Structure formats: C-alpha cells, structure tokens
Amino acid sequence: MKTKSNIKNRWLGMIFVVVLVATAMATTAFGGEAEAAEYTSNMYATVWSLVPPLVAIILALITKEVYSSLFVGIVVGGLFYANFDLKMAYLTIFTNDTDGGMLAKLSDSWNVGILIFLVILGIIVALMNKAGGSAAYGKWASTTFKTRRSAMLGTSLLGCLIFVDDYFNCLTVGSVMRPVTDTHKVSRAKLAYLIDATAAPVCIIAPISSWAAAVAGVVEGVNGLDLFIRAIPYNFYALLTILTMVVLTMTNTDFGPMLEHERNAQLNGDLYTTDARPYAGAEASTAPVGNGKVIDLILPVVVLIISCVIGMIYTGGFFDGETFIDAFANCDASVGLLLGSAAALLITFLLYIPRKVLTFRQFMECLPEGFKAMVPAIMILTFAWTLSGVTGLLGADVFVAGILENSTGVLQAFIPVIVFCIAVFLAFATGTSWGTFGILLPIVVPIMDPASEMLTITVAATLAGAVCGDHCSPISDTTIMASTGAQCDHVNHVSTQLPYALLVAAVSAVNYVIAGFVQNWVINLPIAIVSMIVTVLIIRKAYGNKELPVEK
C-alpha cells in the first residue's frame, strides 16, 4: 500500500535523478570562467527561462516541502544559466559573481533592510508575548469579538487600515489578530488568507503607500500618481479580492483545501491540519511571565505604525522640504521600515523596563527568541530572492515582455486582458509584483494614447495582474510574509489560497474584456462587483451540503 511518506520519498528520488541527469549533461565540467559582462546563456530570453521557477512551484505543491523545492529550482536555473558548466553554475548560485547569486542577494541593502525589519518585528512580538500583553489582548478581544465572523472581519478591517506597506501589513496584522482568531478556532490557513487578501490588494489601491510610490516611479511621460489614482476603479483583482473575502466571511462559505482546514479547526480544534507547524516551538518559548495589560500590546503596535510611517517619509525627504505625497513617492521602504522598527523596539524597552513589566534579563532573552521565530521566513525569502535572481539572469522578463510587444497588433479592446494574463504569469514565475509592473509599465504606457481611457484600463490591468500572480506564487515575498504573520506552514497557505485567487482572477479577466469595449468605470465596476458576488453565491450553492454549520 502506498503511503503519503512513500509517495513523497518517490518524488524526492525522482527530483534527485533529474538533477543528476542534468549534471551529467554538463559540457565543460569545471571549465574556464567567462567574463560576466560578455557572457550570455544559450537559454537567455527563451521559454526555458521560465522553467526554474515553475520547477520550484510545482515541486512545492507536490512535495509540500518548500526549502528543497526552491533550492532545486535554483540549481536548475544555475545550470541553465551556465549552459551546464558545473563550476560556473556553482559560483552563480552561491556567490556574487552575478547579480542573481545568493551572496549578491544577501548583500543587497534593500533585502538586508527587510531581513533586519523581520528580526526586529519578531523580537517585538516575542516581547509582547512574554510581557503578557498578547494574552491580555486575547482575553479582551474574546469579549469584544464574540464570534468567528466578527474575529475574521476584525482581521480584515485591521488589514485595510494598515495600507502603507504590505510587509508591515502582513506581520502586524498577524501578531495582533492571531490570539483573537485562535480563540475562535479560525485555522491558520484562513488567517493567512485574510492577511494576504488585505496586504498587496489594499496597498495597490492606496494612493499613500509604498506601492503607489513604486508605480509612480516607473511611469514616464505622464503624471504617475495621477495615473495610479485614475486606475483604482479598474483594478478589478484587488477590489474583487477584498470583496470576495468579505462575502465569504459573511456567508460562512469555504471551498477547496481551505474547507478541510476550517472544518478541522472548528470540529477538532486543530488550527494547522497538517503536521507542518514551523512556529509552534516559538510560541512555547515565549510563554508569558509578566502581568502585562492590553496597553502593553496596543502601544508598541501603534508606536511601530507611527514610527515606520515617519521612517518612510524621512527617507523620501519630507523633513528636507518635500510634500507628504512626494516623500512617499520617493521613499526607500526598506530603510524606512528598518528605522521605524528600531525606534519602536527602543520605545518598547522604555515602556516595559521602568514599569517592571519585564526584567532586563527577560527583555534580553527575547532578542534571540524573536530571531529564531523569523528563521523560517528568512530562509524562504533567501531562497526566493536567489531563485528570482537566477530567473532574471536567464532573461525571463525579456521573454515575457517580448510576448507583450508582439501582442499589440491584436484588436485593441483585448489588450487589457492580454496584459493582465501576461502580468499574472510573469509575477507568478518570478515571485515579484513590483518587478512585474516595473517591466511591463514602461512597455504599456508608450504604446497607448496618453489621453485615452484605454491607457488607464491597461495600466490597471498590469497592476492587477502583478498582484494576482504575486498572490498565487509560492516564491512571492508577500505570500511568505503572510505565512509568517499567521504562523502558518507556507505550502498550506499557498495551496489553500490558490483556488480563491484563481476564482477572482477568472472573474477579473472577464471584466477586463468587458472594460476593453465599454471603457467607463461607472459601468464596469458595478458589473465586476455583481459578477463576483454571483460567482461566490454559485460556489456556495455548489458546496451547500458540505459547508460548516452557520455560527449562531
């Protein structure tokens, strides 16, 4: 009889054989090095450039093991880039000989800033747990959020309120609402979905956010921020994702793998469903020792939000005379989050130690505990960045951009849906939404009439597709952050969210076809909203005999 363990081992064995065969195909084992500036892979900007991320994604979904899957994808990408020269592939993967290697990614100031922000936030969460602030908040919230529905809606509302940055959104919402959703037996997979559905989708429709700044920065020849604002009503994927999340919560509807996780959480009290529980040890190691109050959680979080916003506008030149909007448009989110979180940690020290909520020794003990809690996220991010870097070396972005350029000759009304689908695929394969619209917008904007509504629709389709692909991709940093914030196994989050994301993507694609002909958001947006609600109700009817009991 075949067991899950045997099947998993079989797949891993097959993967190992494939890697060995690819290695055996090396044309020059440990051959001479080529100058990076003159070197071009034989697979550059071909369909083969998309194979490494697809290998990693497919393996992650099959084996349910993300670290080895990402690493196999990196190895395949390194071999492809080096034309199967083993020495060059090895150096490409691990060093900074190219911009895509692991060392190159870990020495990038943006990436290092995000990692430090992660560690500091992990420390703050550990401090709030040890001080008893999280426990006190959980008790208070259990009387305020009396039902599962109100707990999930409260999570969604908090996610919508923290719109300045998706990384910050994921980790803050998770740390604040996790005690509440745990009390009401909301599965960690569902919590991760609620966090992810209010991270990038909210940021991409918020004019004051790091995402708006990124979009404005890559659009030339027009007012980038003005174009971003005009595109909001046409950003169907972001808007419909938020709508779908609310409708699913209000109607007590789930489907696909998420239904199993929710049933198991409510009926058996198991929030994880699978054996993969990467954060269970971290929770046990930060058991409360102080008599903290609700203020000991609320105040550090509020300080964190305020200080991170100040840090971001500081990097954008606000204190040097720039306007608030321009400061956001020019900010360095990585540095801003680092500065803000460091300031919040210092203020937390001043809040806890003088009041004797924690002793100095207890405070210091939380530093390594917070770091350890973020190790899974750091590992996944490191591998994901390296895989994205190797994919970039293979010219996956050039290949996909070429497809877009060749599609401009089709009937113009279908350009938005074509751009949407291309953006979805590129973001899915590379794991980066910013990189996706950074590549596609400079291509899309020049080919459209600056005064036309079609430009606005196409830009919105680009942004929507980038967020959609980011949502679906296991190697997306935002998806990884959502898993981390919910303390959910990453593969569980991806597999349970994927059906929801694909459903919204399908409805969005249909509405981009309609928008290409109608070109009026006053008409298009209501049609999109109604079509999404009807689709969810059809899904609810199809799963009517399987859904969980409606909460009283």
Image: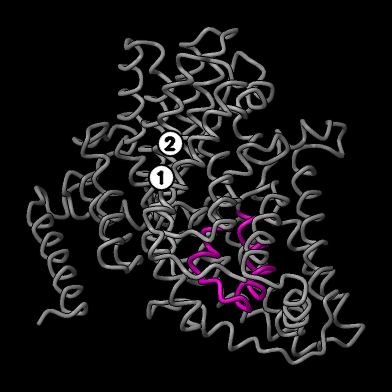
Q: Quadrant of the C terminus?
A: bottom right
Q: Are discs 1 and 2 less than 8 Å apart at CB?
A: yes
x 61%, y 76%: residue: 184
Percent x, y for residue 68?
30, 66
Compared to residue 257, the image places residue 22 above or below, namely above
Compared to residue 212, the image places residue 495 above or below, namely below
* Residue 133 position by quadrant: bottom right
Percent x, y for residue 360?
80, 87
**Alpha-carbon neighbours of circle 2 within 10 Å: few (<14), some, or many (≥20)?**
some
What main secondary structure does the magenta stretch of the protein show? Answer: helix
* Residue 517 position by quadrant: top left
Give residue 203's mark: none
Percent x, y for residue 506?
39, 37
At label 2, which amino acid type do we have?
A: Val
x 49%, y 12%: residue: 446
Give 210 or 505, whichever is nearer the viewer: 505
Compared to residue 296, the image places residue 165 above or below, namely above
Compared to residue 509, the image places residue 516 above or below, namely above
Give 268 or 96, whichever is nearer the viewer: 268
- Secondary structure, mark 1, is helix
| Residue designated by label 1 | 503
| Residue designated by label 2 | 507
At label 1, which amino acid type do we have?
A: Leu
Asked if the magenta segment contains residue 457, the reply would be no
Give 287 or 274, whichever is nearer the viewer: 274
Q: CA distance from mark 1 to mark 2?
A: 7 Å
Residue 109 in view of the camera: no
The magenta region covers 167-194
